[in-house]
Image: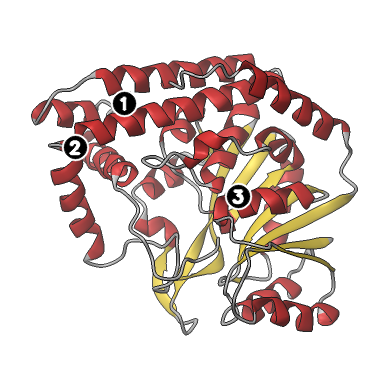
Amino acid sequence: MSSADPAPRAAADAARSIDRLRRRPTLDLSVALCTWNGERWIRPFLESLAAQHHLPDELVVQDDASTDDTVAAIRDLTPTLPFDVRLEVNRQRVGSTANFALALERCRGRFVALADQDDVWYPEKLSRLVHEFERDPILTLVFSDADLIGEDGRSLDRGLWDTRQVGRILRRRPIVAEELAATTALTTGCTVMMRRRVVDAALPFPPELDHPVAPMRHDRWLTLIAAAVGTVEAIPERLLGFRVHGSQETGVLVGAELPKAVATSVGSNLLGGGGRRADGLRARADQLDVAAERAELLGDFGEAATLRRIANDFVRRARIDEPGRGRLRLALGGLPPDGGGVRGLGTALLDVVRAMTPSRPKPAPRHA
C-alpha cells in the first residue's frame, strides 16, 4: 500500500464530504454529461434526453476542451431543450474520469444520472431508474443493461451485458454484493443513476484512481462507494442504445475480439509479467482502502471492514511471486465461494483476464 501517511488527506476529504452532506439538494434530478469532440453524436443524444417521460431538472455539461463544434452544437440546441442546461468548458483536457468529477461537483439533484455524448436514451430510461429509488429507499445506485447499436444507429442485436461475463451473475443476483463491487468492474457509466449520498461520499476523486497499471474509472469508483454506503441494484431492462464505434474509449469486446483478448492476456499476465500484476493488485488495495475511509465517514463501519479485508487479501496475493501454474491458481482464487461449476470457473477466469488486460490506446477517445 502507499507508504505516504494518508491521515492529512483523509482529514481534508472528511471535512469536504461532511460539508457536502450538510447541503440539501435543491433539485430532483440531474444528468451529468461529459463531452469531448462529439459533434457527430451530440444532437441525437440531446434529442433523446428531451424525449424522456421523466425530464431532468438540469443537464450539467462539462466539455473537455473539444476542438470540434461540440460546444457550438450544444449552445445551438439549448434554447429548444425542456430543461436547464449548464455548460462549462475546460481550458485544457483533463481526461474522462477527472472531467466527470468536475461535472458531479456541479450537480444539484438528489438523484444524478451519468450520460455519454454518443448514446441514445429510450424515453422510459430516467422514469424507470427513478422508480427503483422511490420503491426502495435503501438503494444508493441502480444500473441497467443496454442495446448495442452501430455508428449508424442500427441495432447490433446484442445487449451490453452479453459482452460481459459478469452479466450472467447480474441476471441471477440483481442485488450486488459489496465483495463483487470491490473486485469486479460491473457498471458502464451511461447506465447508472445514483443518490446524492453516493456523490457526496465519492468526491473528491482520490489520486489512487489514476494508477498507471490499474486505473479505476469514475463509474467503477462510484459503484464501489455506492455498495459501501448502501445497496446497488442491477436491472436487466435495456434502457438505451449504447453506440459502438472505433473512436470510443470504453468500448466492448465483440465477435472474434473476445477470445483473442483472452489468449493474449493469459499468455502475458497469468504465465508471466508478475511485477506488473503485483503492482496492479497493490493499486487495487490502495483504492479499496480509500473507499473504506469514505464509508467510515458515513458510519458504515462493517462495510469498511469488508473493503479492508479484501484490500489486505490483494496485498497478500501481490507478494506471491510464483510462475506458471502458481499464477493461474492465484487468479482462480477469486472464484465465488459456491464455485459455480464449469460455467462459474469460466466466468471467473474471463473476468480476471479482463481486469488484468492493459487498456489499448484509442485514436479518438469516447468521452464517457
Residue 57 x/y as whole percent: 84, 61
Q: Which mark is residue 103?
A: none
At horizontal 51% and vertical 43% (from top left) the residue drawn is 220
Q: How many numbered marks, from 0 up?
A: 3
Q: Nearer the viewer, mark 1 or mark 3?
A: 3
Residue located beneath label 3 in the image? 98
Q: Residues within 10 Å of mark 1 (few under 14, many from 20)?
A: few
Quarter of the rendering containing residue 202 = top right
Q: Are marks 1 and 3 in contact (CB under 8 Å)?
A: no
Image quadrant holding the C terminus, namely bottom right
Residue 154, compared with residue 343, is above or below; it is below
Q: Residue at x 31, y 26 (%)?
A: 338
**In this picture, residue 198 sits left or right of residue 322:** right
Image quarter of residue 37: bottom right
- Residue identified by numbered label 2: 273
Residue at disc 2, secondary structure: loop
Q: Amino acid at mark 1?
A: Asp
Q: Amino acid at mark 2?
A: Gly
- Which residue appears at 55% of the width and 36% of the height? 207
155 with respect to 112 (left or right): left
Question: Gap in Å between the C-alphas at discs 1 and 2?
Answer: 30 Å
Q: Quadrant of residue 127?
A: bottom right
Q: Is residue 131 among what the camera can see? A: no
Whether residue 309 is situated above or below residue 197 in the rendered picture: above
Q: Are marks 3 and 2 in contact (CB under 8 Å)?
A: no
Give the amino acid at mark 3.
Ala
- Determine which residue is flagged by label 1: 338
Ranked by sequence position, the earlier of labels 1 and 2 is 2
